[in-house]
Amino acid sequence: MPARPPSHPHPSSIPATDATPAARQAFLSVKDAAEYLCLSPHTLYVWRHRRNGPPSFRMGPRGRVMYRIEALDAWIREQEQADSRSNTVLSPLDTAPQKRSDYATSA
């Protein structure tokens, strides 16, 4: 049985005939983007269908869904900033408690 090739941190499944070496370094397929983000390819497909998640686009004559590595990194930074545990500005523990408004009760 032949050995499987080793996995790389930034693999690309674009055939060498379809792209230049620079393009192979800049773009990731769904499978490779999922590996880069430690997610399943199915999650990326669902997010794309729902128009959530990192930005993607179709490329090439077969219309393969692709992700730019720089867009994935930017999306990760956005997720960090949107999380109150990473962004102290959003932390509810740093804000003053809000008082409830007095409700007028008619007697």
Image: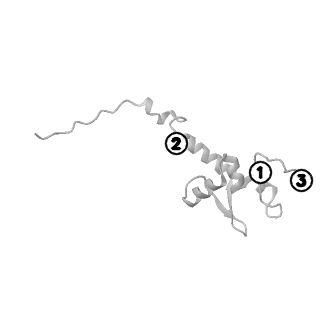
Residue most extreme to the bottom: 61
Looking at the image, tell me whether mark 1 or mark 3 is earlier in sequence order: 3
Q: Position of residue 66 (x, y in %)?
A: 68, 59
Mark 1 or 3, which is nearer the eye? 3
**Residue in front for this viewpoint, 37 or 23:** 37
- The residue carrying pointer 3 sits among few (fewer than 14), some (14 to 19) or many (20 or more) residues within 10 Å by Cα, namely few
| Location of mark 1 (residue) | 11
- Quarter that holds the C terminus: top left
Per the image, the residue denoted by label 2 is 82
Q: Residue at x 72, y 69 (%)?
A: 62
- Whether label 2 touches label 1, CB < 8 Å: no
Label 2 and label 1: CA atoms lie apart by 28 Å
Q: Amino acid at mark 3?
A: Pro
Q: Which is in the foreground here, disc 2 or disc 3?
A: 3
* Mark with earlier residue (2, 1): 1
Q: CA distance from mark 1 to mark 3?
A: 20 Å
Q: Nearer the viewer, mark 2 or mark 1?
A: 1
**What residue is pinned by disc 3?**
2
Q: Amino acid at mark 1?
A: Pro
Amino acid type, mark 2: Ala
Label at residue 99: none
Color style of the picture: one colour
Circle 2 SS class: helix
